[in-house]
Image: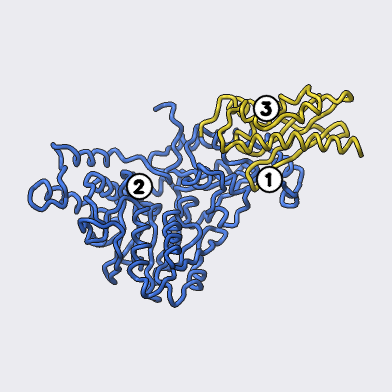
Chain colours: A blue, B yellow
Amino acid sequence: MTNNPIYLDYSATTPVDKRVAEVMCQYLTYEGVFGNPASRSHKYGWDAEKAVEVARQNVADLINADPREIVWTSGATESDNLAIKGVAHFYHKKGKHIVTSKTEHKAVLDSCRQLEREGFEVTYLDPQDDGLVSLESIENAIREDTILVSIMHVNNEIGVIQDIAAIGELCRSRKIVFHVDAAQSAGKVAIDMQQMKVDLLSLSAHKIYGPKGIGALYVRRKPRIRLEAQMHGGGHERGMRSGTLATHQIVGMGEAFLIARQEMEEELKRIHDLREYFLDGIKDMEEVYINGSLENRVPHNLNISFNYVEGESLLMAIDDLAVSSGSACTSASLEPSYVLRALGRSDELAHSSIRFSIGRFTTRADIDHALELLHVKIQKLRDLSPLWDMYKAGIDLSTIEWSAH
Amino acid sequence: MAYSEKVLDHYENPRNVGTIDEDESVGTGMVGAPACGDVMRLQIKVGNDGIIEDAKFKTYGCGSAIASSSLVTEWIKGKSLDDAEQINNMAIAEELALPPVKIHCSVLAEDAIKAAIKDYKSKQSA
């Protein structure tokens, strides 16, 4: 493993915590608990069901919810789909208008696009320059026929934290269902479902040291939120999501959420210190921009534009670091990040952005190495950049007529 | 994305990086746009005999764009303007084994040569 690059892409996914992996292994083989949690006629099934319910409690505890409000899914993408389409299909007689933002995850945006094809109307709000959607803009977008507002808690690209408590108050007062994608916030920001008026909350395991392929949707009981199932079958999960429960995955998610609850406070402090150390280390560099609010932001994320350096060549130069350029989900394409563009960042700044995300196993030595590499390579690429030359010569790039191609 | 060894070589050790001071023997071509993620500036210095004596580049763009411009500076040095103008993007793409999504980098490099020659010629006729 010595030749592997330093992992600074925790927002894309996290390794499974060893403690989690050990627990998961006990739920697979003949010697372990392998039964179908839905089997009611023997001990194999009862043991599996018991393990699933312990995990459900652990997931509920992290967000201060009732375990009966937790529905297992295959991940946050499925949770988003179930929440948005499930609400739209159940409440369509009340109205067909949905409010969301342009910086949501594709799982939310594409679910909304699908609903548009089915005859729903969707308002996609622009964020402010700091990446946050203002309460006023949501309020102004709400209509008589609005049935759902979907706003993410923490943005996957820029890490900004939306004030979901305030949006929840607004939605509740208008009797509109409020869905929150919390894939990037669970375990990083305190979530209290007794306090926050959030009706549906998407959760993922693999963003907080659990396994991939498992997630959950919180569905509020009081006031009761109804959903139309998207996956039909044996009527598992109170009919909201059929399919045999993946006991080992569920147990892994439960263990990961338990560890997150126990260690979050300490871990946040450590990661905050690392983030500050990182920021301190780049403050001597020219033309460096932090994308999104630094105040309302999880400490795990730093999305930085190094002006006049193109992101892909920078990724190539810092191949000792595993990071993302633009949106992680679209880095196979050449389009600049839609999130950064929605923030009003110029295309060249969007093209120059790198997302560093730090986590449980990041060390100060990792950050030192990253800083050293960044200083050397950015200077090298700027020496190669005609735009840097022009900037240094005092030429305003926006005054030049470029030949778009 | 996996890069070919030649792209990596040009990217790690770009040839002929720099700027040539402008005079009437120098042609400068700048192509691309920051919004598209790549800008190439290619300069040629042409001798009295019409042979390209020197070529320099600077490129803002991905590794393939940097490699394409580095490669063409090597190719055009010592060539006549007519021969340099014959270089087409497919030859560049082939030499660097560019994947389909990076073909536009080679097109840009071809455009940069043509733009530099055009600039030089316009200075001569002025």
Circle 3 packing at 10 Å, graded few (<14), some (14-19), many (20+), is many
In the picture as drawn, the residue positioned furthest to the bottom comes out as A144
Instruction: Tell me how far mark 3 sits from mark 1, CA to CA.
Output: 20 Å
| Residue at x 39%, y 28% (from the top left corner) | A1
Per the image, label 3 sits on a secondary structure element best described as helix
Residue A245: x and y in percent read 22, 50
* Chain ID, mark 3: B
Instruction: Tell me how far mark 3 sits from mark 2, CA to CA.
Output: 45 Å
A391 is higher (above) or lower (below) than B66: below
The residue carrying mark 3 is B71
Q: Nearer the viewer, mark 1 or mark 2?
A: 1
Instruction: Tell me how far mark 1 sits from mark 2, CA to CA.
Output: 40 Å
Numbered tag placed on residue A208 in the rendering: 2
Amino acid under label 2?
Ile
Numbered tag placed on residue A25 in the rendering: none
Q: Nearer the viewer, mark 3 or mark 2?
A: 3
Q: Nearer the viewer, residue B72 or A149?
A: B72
